[in-house]
Amino acid sequence: MPSHKTLVINDDIKIIFTFLELVVNIDIYNNEIINTSAIYHNEFILEFNKLVDDYNVTTHYAKLIRYWFNKNYNKLYPQKTYITMYGRIINLK
């Protein structure tokens, strides 16, 4: 199931991240112009750092987006066995 995260820079710029199984889609809405890109999970942090520099994203919001990405990445590729908040046990693949 896809996971979405929206980052609103100002009234004109909105960035929507969509975490899918193979890629992360990045949709940038800027004054009625839509830029869409799909990147692999291992390239996300590098691409996100470029977006942080280009759009002057605050460190707080950058930290929230990185946390969202890491949470979804760990669900897809678990590093260790863990129990979700609903009691499901997620094992290593």
Image (spheres, rainbow, N blue to C red):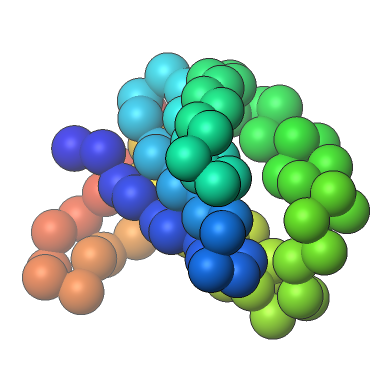
Question: Which residue is pictured at 84% across the width and 42% down the height?
Answer: 50
Kindly give the residue lying farthest to the right in the view shown: 53
Q: Is the residue 19 above or below the residue 13 in the image?
A: above
Tell me if 41 is positioned left or right of 19 in this view: right
Residue 78 image point, x, y percent? 44, 43
Q: Is the residue 38 above or below the residue 51 in the image?
A: above
Question: Which residue is pictured at 50% across the width and 31% down the height?
Answer: 34
Kindly give the residue lying farthest to the bottom in the view shown: 60
Nearest the viewer among 45 and 88 is 45
Q: Is the residue 89 above or below the residue 39 in the image?
A: below
Tell me if 19 is positioned left or right of 59 in this view: left
Tell me if 73 is positioned left or right of 18 in this view: right
Residue 51 image point, x, y percent? 76, 46
Residue 90 image point, x, y percent? 26, 49
Residue 47 image point, x, y percent? 75, 35
Assign the N terminus to one quadrant of the image.
top left
Question: Which residue is pictured at 56% across the width and 59% down the height?
Answer: 12
Nearest the viewer among 31 and 40 is 31
